[in-house]
Amino acid sequence: MGAYRVCGGKKISGELTIGGGKNAILPILASVILNSGVSVLHNCPRIADTFTSIEILETIGCKVAMEGNTLIIDSSGADKCEIPEKLVGKMRSSIIFMGGVLGRFRTVKISYPGGCELGLRPINYHLKALTQLGAEITDEHGFIIAKADKLRGTKINLDFPSVGATENTMLAAVFAEGETMIVNAAKEPEIADLQNFLNACGAKIKGAGTDAITIRGVPRLHGAEYTIMPDRIAAGTFLAAAAVTGGSVTLRNVMAEHLYPITSKLTETGCGIQTRPGIVSLTSPGKLRALDRLRTCPHPGFPTDMQPQMTALLCTANGTSIVEETMFESRNRHVNELMRMGADIILAESGRTAIIKGVKKLKGSTVSSKDLRGGAALILAGLAAEGTTTVTNSEHVERGYERIEHALTQLGADVVHLCSESHLGE
């Protein structure tokens, strides 16, 4: 179990290039199962979830090589349809391998997924959609088994615009007979990235980024070369780091339109935002203003994956902020840890709404990362705090940020990863 030691009081300042997105690479890795050739993926983040996905691919028969941030995947030898329980238990998004394996082999066996404990996050949306495509799904001793003699295109109306259910349905529908339409689809930018990769492999998909996606079934896919989109949540995290420390930062390899839900709220706190093609810059006023209301919503609303970081930022803002979490009932487990550092926060509405009264300063402490984004939030709080903060359970943060301590140090922070050697990539 590693930890981050954060010495507070230093302004975040400078330039940083943002790498590939966690939420983009994972569904694309699940999709390579569908083709029988070689895929070359550039700008892949070297994070724990990427390496777990590689293990899954290798287990089902793919050959994978990683050269820097480029992955070379040969899917031609894939011949297994069961995904090991020990790997599924590592990350929630492993469930999206279900659609790809089912699409290629017409059968898949997978256990219920693990990952960050953010609440129930039921997968019934996934299972309902796959059933509508023609899969027969059974539950055997905690394992989900899906089989289909033939998948047939149909109109699927998702009860909720679930990102994972949208991705799983897209993957399963690629080889389905006829046309599939997903109504009330998730509109996150990563959905469009998945569509663009699949189309590069020969799929026929349109509409990603809107609430209606159409997939016309094809008989086969081929390999492709593709560059993963930049990580908008990592970018938002580094913008928040500069804001909370009274600094300034310029991020390169970003898409400003993807960041607008985040930058618009940072502007409300008093930060100056400038954008150019591929570049976003932030200048903090020093003391930030509170937000009357921040409410997480599906895209293009404010992303739940940035809520903990914004909550940390608002702990020292002038005034009282209200932050409503609508996506995950257990997202706010970082709040008690922030209170250990002197934050003044009251949780209401069954723990989903945080009422944050800004304090003059946070104080360094030893706190525990409960999940990926909560861990990032505690690091940001440590940057703004007096003294030294130790954030334990660093493995949560490693799931989604590529050596976050190096990036923050590059920007002037004093952050050390307290472990002898990173296990990533071994």
Image (tube, rainbow, N blue to C red):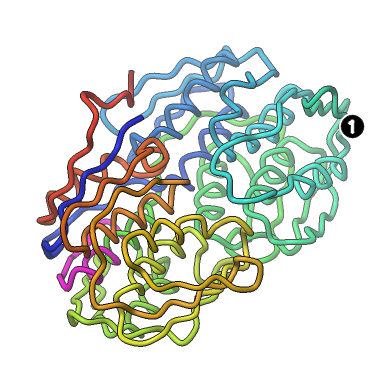
Is 236 contained in the magenta span?
A: no
Left or right: residue 160 compared with residue 48: right
Q: Residue at x 86, y 30 (%)?
A: 150
Relative depth, front residue between 324 and 59? 324
Where is the N terminus found, in terms of image quarters? Answer: top left
Total labels drawn = 1
Q: Which residue is mark 1?
A: 136
Left or right: residue 354 compared with residue 136: left
Q: Position of residue 382 (x, y in %)?
A: 25, 57
The relative height of residue 371 versus residue 162 in the rendered view (above or below) is: above
Left or right: residue 65 compared with residue 165: left
Q: Residue at x 84, y 55 (%)?
A: 155
Secondary structure of residue under mark 1: strand
Q: Residue at x 60, y 28 (%)?
A: 88
Q: Residue at x 27, y 53 (%)?
A: 365
Q: Position of residue 261 (x, y in %)?
A: 45, 73
Q: Which residues are magenta?
A: 240-254
Q: Amino acid at mark 1?
A: Glu
Is 252 contained in the magenta span?
A: yes
Relative depth, front residue between 35 and 135? 135
Relative depth, front residue between 308 and 386? 386
